[in-house]
């Protein structure tokens, strides 16, 4: 994998948003110019824990062309030699592990490793397979969705094989708990890809999600709030956990999700005011069972949360650093929902920040957020890009370390 100087500057801008991208481009250019000049002078460049660079001069040599017995002289060659440092060598030689989060809407996978007690999440991929399409009406994974899911797993397994990943864990959520033919999918997935799917109970799903969120919140908060709620709006269900002093007091799994609501109401865009009111009424009725509390913070995680952040920030591509820790106010959420409900689905798909394959299910997912804000009397949501996927990898790393 190669990276250009412009790409490096752009990635640095995600880490240092207070700096202008033009300034970062100049810094990167000066950095490489400095290395070039010092190497030309014959100096060694050492970057602590990364490696050493220096020039090596090869002697001029003669060689003979066997066809005509003609001799040629090749002048001395100068080449750059890079010797990786001890830490870089150890990091590169530390085995990679992977985790899968297989949901109603999307299949996700992540690669990572543990080095010197620290966990590194290195790369992730997502496939919008919509495995739960038709589940509301038929109670099964349809033939088309079945095939999409198996093909997505094959594609993801090829990525793991390419990177030499041997140890991984795959977890399945709502769709695998509800579909009558879920066992058939699980069996075929293992036969054709070697991926064994562990189906999580709602409690296990919420527990893993919570572990991932708490891990990620350390990056954006000095300390955890005394009372906060973690919300994961999935395709088939919504998991809600309430914590006090970092400890979960209760978890509720609500049988409403973005895909389920879209199919249950057969949503057609633009939405009429009557259809939208009906959707909200249904969500409110399902949230009535939640205890009446006043948390300090609402934290959202999962694909619906990422799309909300991308729409709010108007991102042209997924940027983890911009999304993790981003806060969305209730007023901003209302404005986004108003746009989604008034646009045809083709227009929604072209909105900046929209992920292809989610344009028809974003609205019901965001409406769940809005009703939860109203229920708990809060004015904003905090996005966590860490969740069940990262926690699944953490659980695997603990097992092998």
Image: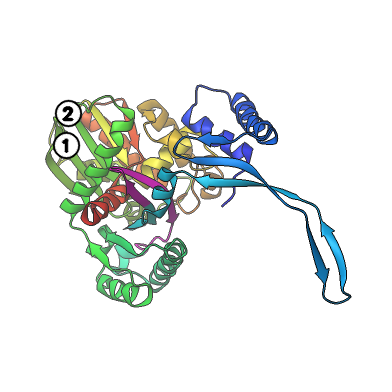
Q: Position of residue 74 (x, y in %)?
A: 81, 57
Q: Which mark is residue 82?
A: none
Decide if residue 80 is on the left or right side of residue 241: right
Q: Residues within 10 Å of mark 1 (few under 14, many from 20)?
A: many
Position of 26 relative to 88 (above/below): above
Q: Which residues are magenta?
A: 112-133
Q: Is residue 38 magenta?
A: no
Q: Residue at x 30, y 70 (%)?
A: 140
Q: Position of residue 269 (x, y in %)?
A: 47, 48
Decide if residue 94 is on the left or right side of residue 311: left
Q: In front here: 150 or 345?
A: 150
Q: Callout 2: helix, strand or loop?
A: strand
Q: In front here: 147 or 96?
A: 96
Answer whether residue 266 is visible to the viewer in this image. no
Q: Callout 1: helix, strand or loop?
A: strand
Q: Which mark is residue 227?
A: 2
Q: Residues within 10 Å of mark 2 (few under 14, many from 20)?
A: some
Q: Quadrant of residue 118?
A: top left
Reading the image, the residue beneath label 1 is: 242
Q: In front here: 275 or 44?
A: 44
Spatial separation of the CA atoms under disc 2 and disc 1: 7 Å
Task: Tell how many labels.
Answer: 2
Q: In front here: 309 or 1?
A: 1
């Amino acid at each position: 994998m190669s990276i250009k100087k412009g790409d490096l500057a752009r990635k640095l801008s995600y880490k240092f948003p207070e700096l202008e991208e033009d300034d970062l481009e100049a810094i990167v250019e000066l950095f490489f110019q400095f290395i070039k000049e010092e190497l030309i002078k014959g100096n060694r460049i050492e970057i602590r824990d990364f490696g050493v660079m220096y020039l090596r001069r090869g002697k001029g040599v003669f060689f003979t062309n066997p066809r005509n017995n003609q001799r040629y002289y090749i002048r001395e060659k100068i080449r750059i030699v890079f010797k990786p440092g001890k830490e870089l060598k150890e990091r590169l030689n530390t085995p990679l592990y992977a985790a899968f989060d297989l949901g109603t809407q999307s299949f996700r996978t992540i690669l990572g490793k543990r080095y010197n007690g620290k966990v590194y999440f290195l790369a992730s991929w997502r496939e919008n397979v919509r495995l739960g399409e038709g589940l509301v009406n038929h109670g099964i994974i349809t033939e088309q969705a079945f095939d999409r899911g198996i093909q997505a797993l094959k594609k993801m397994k090829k990525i793991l094989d390419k990177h030499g990943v041997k140890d991984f864990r795959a977890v399945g959520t709502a769709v695998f708990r509800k579909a009558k033919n879920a066992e058939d999918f699980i069996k075929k997935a293992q036969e054709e890809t070697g991926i064994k799917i562990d189906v999580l109970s709602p409690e296990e799903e919420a527990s893993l999600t919570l572990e991932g969120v708490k891990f990620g919140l350390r990056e954006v908060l000095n300390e955890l709030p005394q009372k906060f709620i973690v919300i994961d709006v999935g395709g088939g269900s919504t998991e809600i956990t309430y914590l006090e002093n970092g400890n979960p007091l209760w978890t509720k799994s609500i049988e409403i999700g973005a895909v389920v609501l879209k199919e249950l109401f057969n949503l057609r865009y633009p939405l009429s005011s009557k259809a939208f009111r009906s959707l909200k009424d249904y969500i409110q009725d399902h949230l009535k069972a939640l205890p009446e509390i006043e948390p300090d913070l609402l934290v959202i995680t999962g694909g619906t949360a990422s799309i909300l952040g991308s729409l709010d920030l108007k991102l042209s591509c997924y940027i983890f650093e911009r999304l993790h820790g981003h806060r969305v106010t209730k007023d901003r959420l209302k404005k986004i929902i108003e746009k989604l409900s008034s646009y045809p689905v083709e227009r929604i798909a072209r909105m900046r920040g929209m992920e292809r394959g989610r344009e028809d299910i974003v609205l019901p997912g965001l409406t769940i957020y809005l009703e939860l804000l109203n229920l708990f009397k809060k004015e904003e949501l905090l996005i966590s890009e860490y969740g069940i996927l990262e926690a699944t990898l953490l659980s695997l790393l603990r097992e092998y370390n």
